[in-house]
Amino acid sequence: MKRSLIPAKTIVLAAMAWMGTDQFVHAQHTPIQPYKGKIGKTIKETSESWAEKKKAPAGAPNVVWILLDDVGYGAISTFGGLINTPTLDSLANNGLRYTNFHTTAICAPTRAALLTGRNSHSAHMGLFPETAIGTPGYDAQIPFEKATAAEILKENGYNTFALGKWHITPLADLTPAGPFNRWPTGRGFEHFYGFPSRGSIDQWHPELWEGTHRQKDQQDGKHFNELIANRAISYVSGQKAGNPDKPFFLYIATGAGHAPHQVAKQWSDKYKGKFDGGWDEYREKVLANQIKLGVVPKDAKLPPRNVGVKEWAALSADEKKLYARFMEIYAGFIEYTDYEIGRVISHLKESGQLENTLVFVSVGDNGASKEGTFVGTVNNYGAGITEEQRLKKNLENIDLIGSEFSKVNYPLGWAAATNVPFRQWKQDANSEGGTHNPLIVFYPKGIKEKGGIRNQYSHIIDLLPTTLELIQAKVPEQINGYKQDPIEGTSLVYSLNDAAAKDRHNVQYYEIHGSRAIYKDGWKAGSLHVKGQDFNADTWQLYNLKEDFNEITDLSGQQPAKLKELRALFDSEAIKYNVYPLKDGTQGYTLQTAYKDLDRVVLYPGQSTIVDVAGPFALKKSFSLIADVDLSGVEDEGVLLSRGGFEGGLSFFIQNRKLNFVYAVGDGTKYVVTSEHATLPQGKVQLRADVKYDENGAGQISLFANNSKVGESKLEKTTGYVYLHEGVNVGFDDLTPVADTYQVPFTFTGKINHVTIDYNPGQQSSLK
């Protein structure tokens, strides 16, 4: 009997047919209870006793949390914006608008803070899983001592459902082998449907998981918004059929309005011509609306345009036409998202549950996105392209904007406009434009006033303690054997029925990418960090937010003592909550994937898709793809290995009896290498593609069949890391095709034994 030896620096992923829907739900177990019955020698002499199940208090409300993505304070009609959101308008008009609510300024930290009720660095999510480093504030390992809302509510007798975007699982855990204890179903959610990794998703071709199982492409052309709304209704309906008296916790985190902005024309066309007046006119109209609604002070003024944003009147006719279309798409995207949220709310109403449901809507996880460049993006992940080239490309593809063949983000002028009345935008933790978002609270049983305004200072970490107080739930001393750390947020229940109540959340720090701020009792000090600059050289500003709501007048020169006091407070809070060491990306990041230290990765047909950003090919490192196959006939063809889709990636495949390799850079450029002359051999064959990068950003692809070179081509430009929406597949391509010559899935018709990714091409390997 022969043994197969697999060296330590090789990972082998095999078929995982055992991975079923929600297979890895990590149930929270109650210790066995003392038996209260009587055991006799016969059943007649025995009195039975059953363990008591955890129950919520009679009449406990359902809880719904809704988190939108990349939506600024001045976007939606509920807070004076020009994008119609009738569902959110209705919730606010029958509940409360909180006008002084804050997030962390960026995605994953806000999600970790929301779900745990602790500050993001305290929850070890100071930035992204993709940028994790080995320090407590940034390792992306949310401690089990900081239980999530789902874990806590499950201990209090609730069913728990999560839908949409997750983005707080460590990269190394995002493999078919797990571990799964930091996936949604490992952190208290009994059901999950959405995407566990990265910050965005293709809305028309979403890569979806249910539980920990990758779902096959069965969306039938449905938009991601519709899919998660359908599943939310299904989860709630099934739960109520099974146990109508049991409350549920439903967490919906949409992909909207994060790029790519994609929506059906029927929604975007509702805004045709509505933004032709431009972003300067938009800012003026929205501020007037906000003053009228009472969601900003009556004397609020517009701040100057953000640096780099041009006056609308100075743009060319082509630029105006293009930029207006970008905003029409974004507006339609947000209104359509509101519609699908409305279907869930309508279901609760029609089933008689809405009146006993507590709803929180955080309109954004940060301010409006500044990732769209000054001219917008049609393909959001283009590499090595100038603004002039991008503008030309955008104009050429204006009819594709918002479609399934685009990856759209709007220009920075619209980001600034939808952030009215604040300066700056997403990522800027020093500015209200990065952190100040609308909050809607709806709870008919607990809120007396309909359509009220609340101006109390509040933060995303406050939603969990508010929820717990309203539903009369407690945080157990231990959950799953882990002693629980204190909740760090402040309950807002004191303000629900008292508009004049004094603030109770009096101190709050902020930090993202080295930009930082500290708030205390209406005063705020902040510093916008310049990447690469010494942190000690950063300039700090000082604002009195009670008199200067949107940070127009810097008082640092007039009140240096107050600034010094606040900077000292930031330092103490930073030490307390794991904010140090400060970092800004100049030191570089090593993606902490399961593959980062491997010489070889061996993949097999039938295995689950490997999550894109957590998979191989993430670093700019030369490699070989080696496919060991059986070609039983000359007509055998199909994909051997693929990663990515039409937006960018690579595909290794056989077509028309030729070996092919497509390398898509991400800006629309695709390099195609095809074997020359000779037909591929039959029988057991080793097919290889060598991808070699040079130090000048170019490279070369060479194709081999049984070690004989059959094709070669130069790469004029390369990308070592493309942030894609589609993962790694063996034996087929998924969702959208990398190559233009086939349609997905283009499943391989021969037999693949395995495909090896070798990071030491031409060198001695550790695999013997």
Image (cartoon, rainbow, N blue to C red):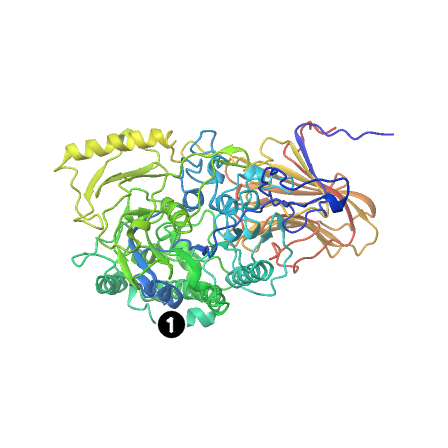
The residue lying toward the viewer, choosing from 102 and 462, is 462
Nearer the observer, 476 or 616: 476
Residue drawn at 67 percent across, 46 percent down: 48
> Which residue is most to the front?
45
Element under disc 1? loop
Q: Quarter-wise, where is residue 24 in the image?
A: top right
Residue 192 at what x, y percent from top left?
A: 56, 51
Out of 596 and 106, give the one closest to the viewer: 106
Amino acid at the residue labelled 1: Lys
Where in the figure is residue 182, as x and y percent of width and height? 55, 40
Where does residue 253 sit, x and y in percent of width and height?
47, 54
Question: Residue 121: horizontal and vertical position, in percent?
Answer: 40, 36
Tell whether 389 sits left or right of 230: left
Residue placed farthest to the right in the image?
1
The residue under label 1 is: 272
Quick one: which residue is furthest to the left in this view?
A: 558
Count the marks: 1
- How many neighbours does mark 1 have within 10 angstroms: few (below 14), some (14-19), or many (20 or more)? some
Q: Is residue 402 visible?
A: no
Q: Is residue 53 visible?
A: yes
> Where is the N terminus found, in terms of image quarters?
top right
Q: Residue at x 23, y 57 (%)?
A: 296
The answer to which image quadrant residue 439 occupies is: bottom left
User: Observer-nearest residue: 751 or 68?
Assistant: 68
